[in-house]
Image: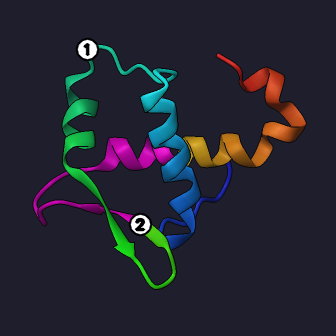
Amino acid sequence: MDDVFQGWNLYPVLMEFEGLLKDRKIHIGDNALLKMHLLNSAIKMDVEQNKGKLIKISQTDHIDGMAALIDALTVRQKWFGEIGDQLKN
């Protein structure tokens, strides 16, 4: 367990996630619920600060799966230097 505060601070992790998806290093398989949560997500940009944060496309959308995935990648990124070999999967 680790604390992850969701907001503008997660932009580097969102960019890493995008790269991992493009490089086909992350596979979500047939998980329809996660696909729905990914499709309901967007990044709201603050161009002055060159930062972005995860948001729902619509107020009624659910993005919990996407947020959980980004939280997991945040913890992975935080501890990779110390226990990176244990985190490889």
Q: Is residue 52 above or below residue 76?
A: below
Specify the segment rendered in magenta: 53-70
Q: Residue furthest bottom?
A: 48
Residue named by callout 1: 30
Q: Which mark is residue 89?
A: none
Q: How is the image coloured?
A: rainbow
In the displayed structure, does residue 17 sit left or right of residue 78? left
Q: Position of residue 15 (x, y in %)?
A: 51, 50
- Pointer 1 with pointer 2, Cβ within 8 A: no
Q: Which quarter of the figure has residue 27?
A: top left
Q: Position of residue 38 (x, y in %)?
A: 27, 41
The kind of residue tagged 2 is Lys
Q: Is residue 35 above or below residue 3?
A: above
In the displayed structure, does residue 17 sit left or right of residue 36? right
Q: Secondary structure at mark 2?
A: strand
The kind of residue tagged 1 is Asp
Q: Is residue 66 above or below residue 25?
A: below
Question: Residue placed at 70% from the left, 44% from the top?
Answer: 77
Question: Residue placed at 58% from the left, 57% from the top?
Answer: 12
Instruction: Tell me the crowding category of disc 1: few under 14, some 14 to 19, or many 20 or more residues within 10 angstroms, Cα based.
Output: few
